[in-house]
Amino acid sequence: MATDNPSSAPPPPVPRTPARALLPQVLPALVIGVGASLLFLAIEWLSEELKDVLWDSLPDALGIGGFSSLWTIVMLTATGIVVGLVIWKVPGHAGGDPAEGGLDSAPVAPMVVPGLLIAGTLTLAGGVSLGPENPIIVANGALAYWLGRKAAPSVPGAFWVALAAAGTVGALFGTPVAAALVISEALVHKPGEGHGSLWDRLFAPLMAAGAGAMTTTLLAHPSFDLSLPPLPEPGWSDLLASMVVATAAAVFGLLCCYGLPYVHRAFRRLKHPMLMLPAGGLVLGLLGALGGSLTLFKGLEQMKELTANIGGWSSGELAKMAVVKLAALLVAASCGFVGGRIFPAVFIGCAFGMLAQALVPEIHPAVAVSSGVLGVLLATTRQGWLSLFVAAVLASSPTMLSLLCLASLPAWLVVTGRPQLELDESGNALH
């Protein structure tokens, strides 16, 4: 029987965007994607060259061990001094407080970009436990927004920012899939933005992400494969292990989130970047001397070295590295260093997973490492799709995906509604 109740009527179909409206987006998406990748690769190359000078050539010339405790403390403290100078003196002050910025930060003025990139490069080269993603995304977003508004003033600024973010994420991970997952999650949070179906709104960002990913792949050949032994056929014990490790890793990652407001407040009492950054660098140097060279830098290459010796690390060594890296990420994110948190969080998850496997050798290494990365990323990024993607890519095993999807559910119940690794303008943790 028919009803006049409008709430029972089916929802209207989502209007489809015609091809003639999507085609003009192709060229700007390709240009921004390639440009985002080139800027990322330039910063990565420059930071690696500077890292070789600071940690190899210079200590060799001085007759000092490059990763000795003394050199680690000196280098991290000096990095804090130099980055503090950049933030203090360079126009734009390298943007706002890094503790208040996420992957979807609003575009900054172009004058901020040089200082932001200089500070980010020095942070990467100096051994600070932060990655390149946040400053690169902010810089690319600012440049794309500025150039896009000049070239096509009628186009919403959010369009250019989305292309830059997608191109950068694609470049960072060498695949457009990560960018598509991050942007689709953002569109769910902001359903009123854009018109047409999800794929219509993803068309240009996915094009930019593909261009960025291909540029990075062709020029740099990145690899996230940890060469973990493949998991042939997962069983019930693997599922249980994955859920337990991911949930425990999420709890471990939340320690960093809960500590951020307090540590951030302690550094803010110093009130000046030339006090906050050197103090943070000194603390990071002491942590690096305690944890060893693998706990320095963003963590990607160090993670490969860590997993190359599965079974060769004691549980005590793995626990120390996981705790030190977590503390280093907390300090670096609190004291004002410019950088992202995804790559250090991946290292933390990897060390935590290997610790679980060392304590319970029956857990398959791929299950332990992937689940540990999943849990820590869920806690520190609150990006569900990105966390699943990175954890699955590291295992390089299709059979792991179903386990990780199920393992993410109890881990998500632990982290949802909890403090995030990001602060609001008042210095309070976002939930």
Image (cartoon, helix red, strand yellow):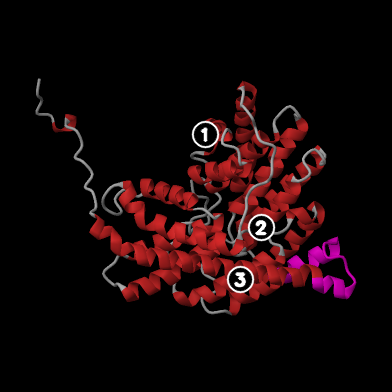
Q: Label 1 is placed on what type of residue?
A: Cys
- Taking the image as shown, residue 233 lies to the left or right of residue 175, namely right
Structural crowding at the residue carrying mark 3, measured as other residues with C-alpha within 10 Å and reported as few (<14), some (14–19) or many (≥20): many
Instruction: Give the secondary structure at mark 1.
Output: helix
* Residue occupied by mark 1: 405
Residue 307 occupies quadrant: top right
Q: Mark 2 points at which residue?
A: 298
Q: Position of residue 141 (x, y in %)?
A: 44, 66
From the viewer's perspective, is 79 left or right of 317? left
Q: Distance between the residues labelled 1 and 3?
A: 37 Å
Residue in view at x 57 percent, y 79 percent: 90
Residue found at the far top of this picture = 1
Q: Is residue 40 left or right of residue 13?
A: right
User: Is residue 360 highlighted in magenta?
Assistant: no
Q: Can residue 234 be seen in this view?
A: yes
* Rendered-image quadrant of the N terminus: top left
Q: Give the range drawn in magenta.
A: 57-80
- Taking the magenta stretch, the answer to whether it contains residue 74 is yes
Labels 1 and 3: the sequence-earlier one = 3
Considering every residue shown, the one lying at the far right of the view is 63
Q: Is residue 29 left or right of residue 39?
A: left
Under circle 2, the secondary element is: loop
